[in-house]
């Protein structure tokens, strides 16, 4: 199982607002993998993948991951 961090529906809804995505229709945990937590998020705009990096250093994440 690769869902190490469980996120509640209210938290997932807040994340979609933070990323300016439409409201959630469905969420599926992605059980494949060994290190990170992944979810498929479905909304009227399409399907998104949310990855929670469980073992990456914060400074390394900031340098490698860009979002807008």
Image (cartoon, rainbow, N blue to C red):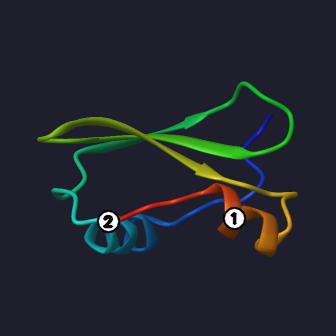
| Picture mark count | 2
Q: Residue furthest top?
A: 32
> In this picture, is 48 found above or below 50?
above
Q: In which quarter of the image is the C terminus?
A: bottom left
Q: Which of 68 and 50 is in front in this view?
A: 68
Q: Is residue 31 above or below residue 45?
A: above
- Label for residue 19? 2
**Residue at the image position 39 percent from the left and 69 percent from the top:** 15
Q: Please identify the quarter of the rendering in which residue 3 is found.
A: top right
- The residue that label 1 is drawn on is 63
Helix, strand or loop status at disc 2: loop
Q: Which residue is drawn at 76% across and 45% down?
A: 36
Label 1 element class = helix
How many neighbours does mark 1 have within 10 angstroms: few (below 14), some (14-19), or many (20 or more)?
A: few
Screen quadrant of the N terminus: top right
67 with respect to 2 (left or right): left
User: Viewer-proximal residue, 47 or 10?
Assistant: 47
Of labels 1 and 2, earlier in sequence is 2
The residue at the far left in this view is 44
Q: Would you say 49 lies left or right of 53 here?
A: left
In front of the other: label 1 or label 2? Answer: 1
Give me the C-alpha separation between circle 1 and circle 2.
19 Å
């Amino acid at each position: 199982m690769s869902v190490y961090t469980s996120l509640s529906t209210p938290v997932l809804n807040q994340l979609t607002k933070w990323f300016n995505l439409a409201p959630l229709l469905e969420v599926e945990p992605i059980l494949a993998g060994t290190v990170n937590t992944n979810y498929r998020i479905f909304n009227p705009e399409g399907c998104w993948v949310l990855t929670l990096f469980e073992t990456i250093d914060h400074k390394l994440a900031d340098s490698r991951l860009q979002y807008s």
